[in-house]
């Protein structure tokens, strides 16, 4: 009989023992049982090794899952922080624009006030110029009348002097 070390359940069930006068050949049964025991022992060792391998892989899997969760948490936190930074930057940008618009409006109002003030000053200067021009014309007119009056008086005096002579 040729015995293999690893038996399948079918081989074990279908194995025929040779019979001897008093039953099965004891040596053949012993060899077969030893082979089954060795095969079973190898299976136990292999099963133990596989259980340890499953435990090791499960441990690695748990570690990877923990790392994955940490990465997910970090990614979520980074995204949340990014969103907050973006939101704060947008708010700050809006505030800067609003402040710039307010200052621009104030500068514009100030410029308009200065423009109005300058225009009033120009109008005041024009009025003063017109008043000065009118006063000068009046002065010239009065001086002209005065010169005419003096000339007429001089002419009359000359006429009187000539007539007295």
Image: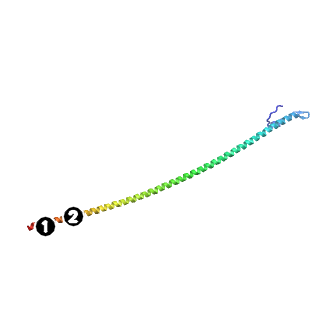
114 displayed left or right of 80: left
Residue at image x 63%, y 48%?
72
> Around disc 1, counting alpha carbons within 10 Å, would you say few (fewer than 14), some (14 to 19), or many (20 or more)?
few
Q: Secondary structure at mark 1?
A: helix
Residue furthest to the right in view is 21
- The x, y position of residue 157, in whole percent, is 13, 67
Viewport quadrant of the N terminus:
top right
138 displayed left or right of 155: right
- The x, y position of residue 55, in whole percent, is 73, 44
Number of marks in the rendered image: 2
Quadrant housing residue 35: top right
> Around disc 2, counting alpha carbons within 10 Å, would you say few (fewer than 14), some (14 to 19), or many (20 or more)?
few
Residue at image x 60%, y 50%?
77
Query: Which of 97 and 153 lies nearest the eye of the viewer?
Result: 153
Residue at image x 40%, y 58%?
112
> Mark on residue 157?
1
- The x, y position of residue 82, in whole percent, is 57, 50
Residue furthest to the left in view is 165
128 relative to 80, above or below = below
Query: Is there a contact, CB below 8 Å, between mark 2 and mark 1?
Result: no
Colour setting? rainbow
Q: Nearer the N terminus, badge 2 or badge 1? A: 2
Q: CA distance from mark 2 to mark 1?
A: 20 Å
56 displayed left or right of 33: left
Q: Secondary structure at mark 2?
A: helix
Residue behind mark 2: 143
Quadrant housing residue 15: top right
Viewport quadrant of the C terminus:
bottom left
- The x, y position of residue 3, in whole percent, is 82, 33
Residue at image x 50%, y 55%?
95
> Mark on residue 146?
none
């Amino acid at each position: 009989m040729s015995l293999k070390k690893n038996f399948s359940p079918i081989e074990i069930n279908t194995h025929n023992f040779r019979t001897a006068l008093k039953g099965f050949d004891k040596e053949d049964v012993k060899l077969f049982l030893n082979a089954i025991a060795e095969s079973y022992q190898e299976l136990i060792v292999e099963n133990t090794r596989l259980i340890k391998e499953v435990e090791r892989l499960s441990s690695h899997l748990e570690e990877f899952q923990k790392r994955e969760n940490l990465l997910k948490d970090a990614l979520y936190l980074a995204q949340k922080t990014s969103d907050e930074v973006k939101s704060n930057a947008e708010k700050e940008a809006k505030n800067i624009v609003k402040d710039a618009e307010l200052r621009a409006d104030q500068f514009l109002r100030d410029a308009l006030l200065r423009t109005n003030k300058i225009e009033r000053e120009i109008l005041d200067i024009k009025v003063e110029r017109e008043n000065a021009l009118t006063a000068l014309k009046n002065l010239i007119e009065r001086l002209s009348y005065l010169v005419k009056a003096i000339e007429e008086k001089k002419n009359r005096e000359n006429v009187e002097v000539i007539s007295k002579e």
